[in-house]
Image (cartoon, rainbow, N blue to C red):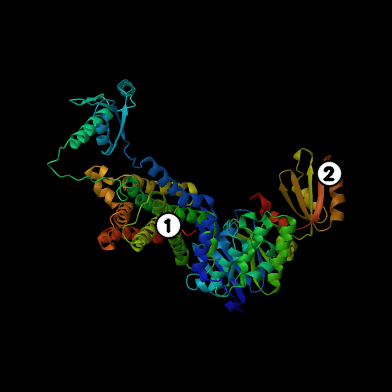
Amino acid sequence: MARTRGAGGPLLELTRARWLEFAREPEAIFWVFVFPVLLAGGLGLAFRNRPAESLKIGVADRVGAEAIAAALEGAPGLAPDVLGEGEALEALRTGKLALVVIPGDSTTYLFDPTRNDGRLARLKVDDAIQRAAGRTDPKLVRDHQLDQPGSRYIDFLIPGLLGMNLMGSGMWGIGFNLVQTRRRKLLKRYLATPMRKSHFLASFVLSRLLFMVLEVAALVGFGWLVFGVQVRGSMINLLIVSVIGALAFAGLGLLTASRAQTIEGISGLMNFVMMPMWIFSGVFFSYTNFPESMQPFIQALPLTPLNDALRSIMLDGAPLGENLARLAAIGAWGGLSFLAALKLFRWS
Amino acid sequence: MDNKQFAVRCTGLKKRYKDVVAVDGLDLEVSVGECFGLLGPNGAGKTTTVEILEGLLTPNAGEVEILGMRWGSHDREIRQRLGVQLQETKLAEKLTVEETLRLFCSFFSNARDVDEILDIVQLQEKRRSWVSRLSGGQLQRLSVACALVNYPDLLFLDEPTTGLDPQSRRQLWDLILDFKLRGGTIMLTTHYMEEAHRLCDRVAIIDHGRVIAEGTPGELIARLGAEHVLEFALENGVRPPDDWLLTLPGVQQVSYKGAAISLTVTEVHEAVPALLTGLAERQLTLTQLSTHHATLEDVFVSLTGRHLRDG
């Protein structure tokens, strides 16, 4: 007398159980969602681009002072003030002013050449005064200032953190849970039912994909809302790369956890596997800082092509076509790990 | 011979772990509808035996037949019809009772309704509680519930009541007896003699991976040749000679455990006065004396010279 089965069949129920267990673990939520956002917030704040401060310039209250002050007023980054001469000299001496201009037949600049702001003020003030007096620049130049979204440190950081998070939560989410299930003899209990082993393993991978969407949304959303970090390429492409990355690290997580029997054992193994990628794969800074001889090794790590692909889509708006080689490398890591995990897996 | 009448049959079962022989040539036959008990101290090989029968371990040698089928060729068919409760399983702590049962139901093609199982194991009130919030007895009932989700024909219970308080134990016994009444076959391991006596139609006593005695609880006790056990101890742990004790009226067997001496006797009212008189003649002082009806425990002691709980 057959009755209703679990509402959605074994794969769905296993995935659901995995999801519920994860969602009810406050630590997991913290490390997967809150920690990367805090990290992004902290680093973004520390390395933010400060607007250049205006240099304070004193103009001695003599004939022509107003004209000079007006000329300086029109130059960017200078804040002139007309002061009594004694007062101006006192302010210069105590570092409140970067430079004092004394108008006259020949204009005099008073400044301390050992101070950076003094030297800088000398250049800018002179430039402004000469231009006001009619000097023209023979060579046309243009400034391109690197404070636009897309080229700041936070723009570099967000895709790197995204890659790191895809790796970390894939590895931890699967490895920890799996070893726990094995250690509690729950895996053995499941095997005593007609549950298919492939369903069991697939449920880990599927639940990872669900979390992945939320992780990407949290981090990209945070970067956009707080720092104005934009995704130049298509969101779909970003998601596709994230899916491939998440699957690859799910495979690597399965492999890492395929034989471990204790939480201590799996923790050590996970850190051992992830540590080189935290350092070398260009999460916080570009991997080109490492010597040329190390590059082949760095390129062989799965997180490196993932970070590169995420950056190319988020920052350069690159299409998927430009990332095929990277995606193939990531996919190969995932596929081979998964196959090896199936071979090595300790079911009891 | 018609295999179908046996729910479990195994012959020449052997299992070695590195340098330990856990199961050493074990034969068992359990008929359909029977409640069969495996008795033995810790480390006797009960759990290993059961896990081989459940298809979770592969034996080094021997044949296993479950419900007329063999592991290796009919695994999924067998599993559809088995109910298994493992001794050490800890269910996922952060799932509720209901979610846990739903999950287990999803594995079977003929699962019960979650409500129906909750009724059977009386956990309706706890359906929305996390597994981590359950008491020992509730946990154990949930564990058995997970084994009942598929209307199993054969139920394996590995020490289902170990560590439970008497009331929880009785609740579980009722559950098991009810399953048996409905025609289910049960294979149970335990080291509680009362449990085996109460639930099992037949028991096999296992020691060092072998069956050392098999039969109904009544038969095994009858094999002692006496219905009562007389236990005593003497001052300074003195042991009177065996041959004298065996001449006392009705004494069938003598065994020792530390300072305690136990006699299996047919008639207590004849043996006790004779013992007291004899001890007085030898000027030996009793420090302890008690009698009880012979139990499976006494059967085990008489067969091995050890108590079941000694491990």
Label 2 sits on what residue type? Leu
Residue A272 is situated, as x and y percent measured from the top left of the image, at: 39, 46
Give the letter of the chain under mark 1.
Answer: A
Give the vertical position of B115 relative to A41 (above or below). below
- Asked if marks 1 and 2 fall on the same chain, the answer is no
A179, above or below B214, in the image: above
Q: For residue A153, what is the image quadrant?
A: top left
The answer to whether any part of residue A345 appears in the image is no
Front residue (pair A127, A239): A127
Query: Going by the image, does B35 lie left or right of A299?
Result: right
Residue B272, position as x, y percentages in the image: 85, 51
Residue B134, given in percent of the width and then of the height, sits at 65, 56
Residue under label 2: B279
Q: Which mark is residue B69?
A: none
Kind of residue sitting beneath label 1: Ala
- Given residues A204 and A261, the one toward you in this image is A204
Q: Tell me how far mark 1 sits from mark 2, CA to CA.
A: 87 Å
Q: How far from the left and from the top, in percent, is residue B230?
A: 80, 52
Tell me how many marks there are: 2
Question: Where does label 1 land, which residue?
Answer: A217
Q: Quadrant of the N terminus of chain A?
A: bottom right
